[in-house]
Image (cartoon, rainbow, N blue to C red):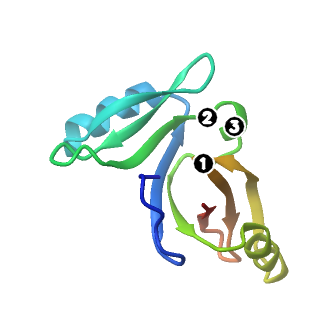
Amino acid sequence: MSGETPEFGTIGWHDLTVDDASGLRDFYARVVGWEFSGLDMGGYEDYVMTAPATGDGVAGVCHARGSNAGVPPQWISYVVVQDLEGAVARAVEMGGACVNGPRGAGGGRMAIIRDPAGAVLGLYQP
């Protein structure tokens, strides 16, 4: 997430979690023009992809390791919520599932849910 706290109910971040984050980092740098910086994950790096015009972080490309080992290999948008545990509980009550988390991430807490149709969405509480 960038320095400003996004408004609740808005998409605050996008992540892609894959086995070869370095290769996909280079793919997206060449295809869409993003620049990148490494983010130390304790023994390996994930990547913050930045918009070249502003230098603002716009997405993450992450290795499917450690706490990200169970994250599906697809782009996941993160919606900012006020109460992460409450949102996860409501998702489960309504026929969804919690795929990953809740856990700490990016100065806040996150979880990935699956809706009753099978689509996944990230939730983030600053």
Label total for image: 3
Indicate which disc residue 69 carries.
3
Q: 71 or 58, which lies in front? A: 58
Residue lying at 59% horizontally and 26% vertically, measured from the top left:
41
Please identify the quarter of the rendering in which residue 96 is found.
Answer: bottom right
Label 2, label 1: how far apart the Cα atoms are = 20 Å
Label 2, label 3: how far apart the Cα atoms are = 4 Å
Query: Mark 2 or mark 3: which comes first in sequence?
Result: 2
Q: Amino acid at mark 1?
A: Gly
Q: Amino acid at mark 3?
A: Ala
Q: Amino acid at mark 2?
A: Ala
Instruction: State if disc 3 and disc 2 touch (CB < 8 Å).
Output: yes
Mark 1 sits on what residue? 107
Counting from the top left corner in percent of width and height, residue 49 is at 35, 41
Counting from the top left corner in percent of width and height, residue 79 is at 54, 69
Q: Secondary structure at mark 2?
A: loop
Instruction: State if disc 1 and disc 2 touch (CB < 8 Å).
Output: no
Q: Secondary structure at mark 1?
A: loop
Query: Mark 2 or mark 1: which comes first in sequence?
Result: 2
Mark 1 crowdedness (10 Å alpha carbons): few <14, some 14-19, many ≥20: few
Mark 2 crowdedness (10 Å alpha carbons): few <14, some 14-19, many ≥20: some
Mark 2 sits on what residue? 64
Residue lying at 52% horizontally and 36% vertically, measured from the top left:
62
Q: Nearer the viewer, mark 2 or mark 1?
A: 1
